[in-house]
Amino acid sequence: MEFFLEEGKQVHGKNSTLILPALSIGNVGQLAVDLLVSTMRATRIGYLDDPFVLPCIGNNAYEPFPHGELALPLEVYESTSNALTLVQQRSPVIKGKMVDFAKNLADFIASYGKMHVVLLSSLDFGRWQQIDTSSGSQIHYLSSTNDDGTDDKCEQMGWRRLQEYDPQQRRWQYLSTLTEAKATPEDDLPFDEELEEGDYLPSLPFASLFTFLKAKGVKVTCLFCYCSEGDNIPDAFNLAEATGKLLGLSPGGEGIQWQVPFSWKSVYGPPPDLSIF
């Protein structure tokens, strides 16, 4: 993975926290990152190039007049006022190459001295096995702070640890072995076989990213919301608000005044031509 710094831009070493999405159902993590970039008026400082991410190109997602700036598959943004770095991923990883991509990204993040990574992702509501709404929160989390995935700060916020997480489960164990230099994705357990009970979580992109970042000694906090395909903008707000709460982005409890990205205006295309009715 290569990082290309844009001309006239620089990396701020004080930004020790990184936010990035892990692609999943409804693209909620990506939408939440879009919302955070737009609201914090983060500046794009460069982009990443990785052989395992499919190419794509598009207009600037945040301004009505792109001024020649094109959106790329992996973009790096910085919000110096909040001491945050954000990575936006706009296209998927090549099938079967998620482990390789996770390794490359973890190497890059560790090399730039990031101490805390916040992964934003979504989970399929149809696979939610242990529904518990007693906490009143729709946010679930997974942390590298403790071996069982718990984190005191997240618990204090009323979030629940991902109940289905089991570090002793076979695919979680398999991912852990891949962090060792001697192991390769071809060893033993192929990920294209039929999933069994308990295989769903470690088969998702966030699991590989979580495992490789944890192996690098980077603190990782994964924030999730369960959702279905459809209008996932409310889910994105929910996930972005949780991120703001976790990182203290609204001092004094005043709340964040969200700025909707310009690209969201056309997320479902133009309205129907009324002449057809």
Image (spheres, rainbow, N blue to C red):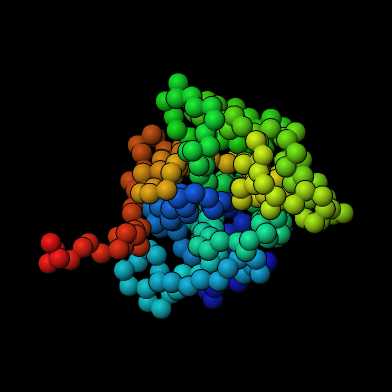
Query: Seen in the image, is 72 located left or right of residue 16?
Result: left
Quadrant location of residue 151? top right
Q: Residue at x 62, y 41 (%)?
A: 201
Q: Nearer the viewer, residue 259 or 207?
A: 207
Q: Nearer the viewer, residue 162 or 227?
A: 227
Residue closest to the far bottom: 68
Q: Where is residue 129 in the image (x, y as percent from the top left)?
A: 54, 30
Is 50 located above or below residue 268 in the figure?
below
Q: Which residue is drawn at 40% across and 71% down?
A: 59
Quadrant location of residue 4? bottom right
Q: Which of 248 and 63 is in front in this view?
A: 63
Is 57 located above or below residue 95 in the figure?
below
Quadrant location of residue 250? top left
Query: Seen in the image, is 275 located left or right of residue 137?
Result: left
Q: Position of residue 182 (x, y in %)?
A: 87, 54
Q: Residue at x 63, y 61 (%)?
A: 95
Q: From this viewpoint, is residue 108 visible?
A: no
Q: Quadrant of the N terminus?
A: bottom right
